[in-house]
Amino acid sequence: MKKKIGAGLLVVLLAFLYYYVTLPAVNIHESGFWIFLCGLVLLVLILYGIRKRITGVRQLRSDKILKGGFLLLLVIVLIYGAGALLSSPVVNAKKYQALLEPEERNFAEDIQEISYDQIPLLDKDSAELLGNRKMGSMVDMVSQFEVSSLYSQINYQGQPYRVSPLVYASPIKWLTNQKDGIPAYVRIDMATQNTELVKLEEGIKYSESEHFNRNIYRHLRFRYPTYMFDQLSFEIDDNGTPYWICPVKKFNIGLFGGQTIGRVVLCNAQTGECQDLKIEDCPAWVDRAYPADLLLQLYDYHGMLQNGFFNSVLGQKGCLQTTDGYNYLALDDDVWVYTGVTSVSGDKSNVGFVLMNQRTMETRYYACEGAQERSAMDSAEGQVQNLKYTAAFPLLLNISDQPTYFMALKDGAGLVKKYAMVNVQKYQNVAIGDTVQECEKNYEDLLKDSGIVTKAVSENDLSAEGVIHRMAQAVLDGNSHFYVTLEGQELIFDIPVTEFPEIIRYEAGDRISLRYVSEETICTVTQLEGREPEETAEETEEETAGEDEEPGETE
């Protein structure tokens, strides 16, 4: 009897250790739970077989308990295999395709031109460099802590930020500091590149770098043993309080298929207190309930399975997929995942792009043919190939109602040196600038010079009217310009032929009316008023005389 009790306790101890380390959810939808069951049954059978051997039993093949145990193991494996097959897109293509329903929207209306202080200029790699540099300057902490590699993209008080907690530098440093917890987190303004080490009055007690029960994954598992958690993210609320955002998986197709997010657990990183909420009740300050990888996978299901599973593998008629890479865009105080949409033919062009809300899963599709992001990055790098800068994955901006790739250009050390804007539809149009403002101005001038857009008339534009005194033609960057002066005025008016081709019908002596932007002596014309060149006085008199004569009368 004592041996049986000892064997039972050993099984329980080993099972607990396995559970404590691997932390599978006690849920039939969790693959790890089925592996745990198989391992548990197999462990019992091994210990039973060892015990029989010790007691002198040689014919184990005829043992009913062993046979029953192996039969149970086989049943578990068969159930798992059948569940995996019946949950797969092979037999549920329509259900997978319907998991996400994009709404087709208008780009210029949705993506308003945003101000410079709202454009995230840095990618995650650049943010890590700034965070590590800031940490290196904190003499009192650098020997004990490091910066985590999380760097979650969030909106904080209307601005794009990345935040990341500190972690213990080593197990020894954890042992000496875990009583007070982690004292700070890093907050980086992605628009201004301002990096702060935010010190906390109360340390972070629950994190990924903790061991034993204060490890955030173990803390969640023991509190919610049946919940299947997806990727955790580190965020701060409107008051700067650190939280762990813990999305809970929801499987909509069979045992293991059609994953979305059904609930969100908000865990206070300082106290360990948790809020368990439905996904639709998630507060607005939370920016990342749906991981970006999950959203991309859901859209790929939608684009690839429109005509069934086998078409997605064989004929691939009408199949669309997301491009290789993504970035984030801040809209309406939410973080949206941006990525391009392309056909599976590998033609290196996009048919459109999507924005996917990380809090609500709302998906917007914008039809826009143009270059893939990688092609635009290559085009931007080509403009500075002598400097050997590399382009970060682009953001999508609205510049002059044109879908525009915006990207940072980094040197070999990963530092941002220049910025580039590339037109999505005509990716050979590339503008470079040392600042965002300079880059945008160069890009807008490029759009106007290439005829993609015309200069809009502003309320601040000036007007002029008069008789043309002189006209001269010049070619700038391959485009013809007419330079015009009016009688009695010293200003010179620059009129590009690409925007106003009707100027070629005018000559000296004609009356003209125009609007312009004053740039000291040379003024850029923004609009011609559409007046036709005036006829000569002689022609006018002849026509008037002809109108006064009666038909058939002559002098």
Image: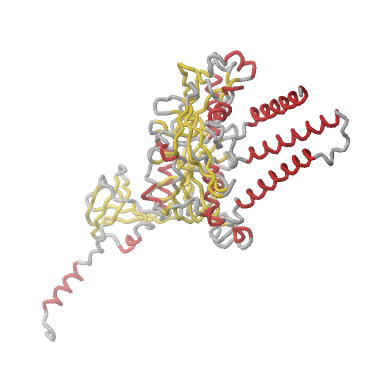
Q: Nearer the viewer, residue 121 or 89?
A: 89
Spot occupied by residue 284 in the image (x, y as percentages of width and height) = 39, 36
Spot occupied by residue 83 in the image (x, y as percentages of width and height) = 63, 48
The residue depicted at 47 percent of the width and 18 percent of the height is 199
In the rendered view, would you say 386 is above or below 305?
above
Q: Quadrant of the C terminus?
A: bottom left
In the rendered view, would you say 405 is above or below 212?
below
Tag count: 0
- The image's colouring method is secondary structure
Q: Is residue 247 left or right of residue 480?
A: right
The residue depicted at 29 percent of the width and 50 percent of the height is 457
Spot occupied by residue 532 in the image (x, y as percentages of width and height) = 25, 64
Locate residue 74: give its quadrant. top right
**In the rendered image, is residue 433 in sight?**
yes
Q: Quadrant of the N terminus?
A: top right
The residue depicted at 31 percent of the width and 64 percent of the height is 505
* Outermost residue, front side: 1
Q: Nearer the viewer, residue 489 or 76?
A: 76
Q: Is residue 53 left or right of residue 262?
A: right
Spot occupied by residue 295 in the image (x, y as percentages of width and height) = 52, 45
In the rendered view, would you say 480 is above or below 19?
below
**In the rendered image, is residue 431 in sight?**
no
Q: Nearer the viewer, residue 212 or 325?
A: 212
Q: Nearer the viewer, residue 310 or 369?
A: 310
* Outermost residue, bottom side: 552
Locate residue 207: give its quadrant. top right
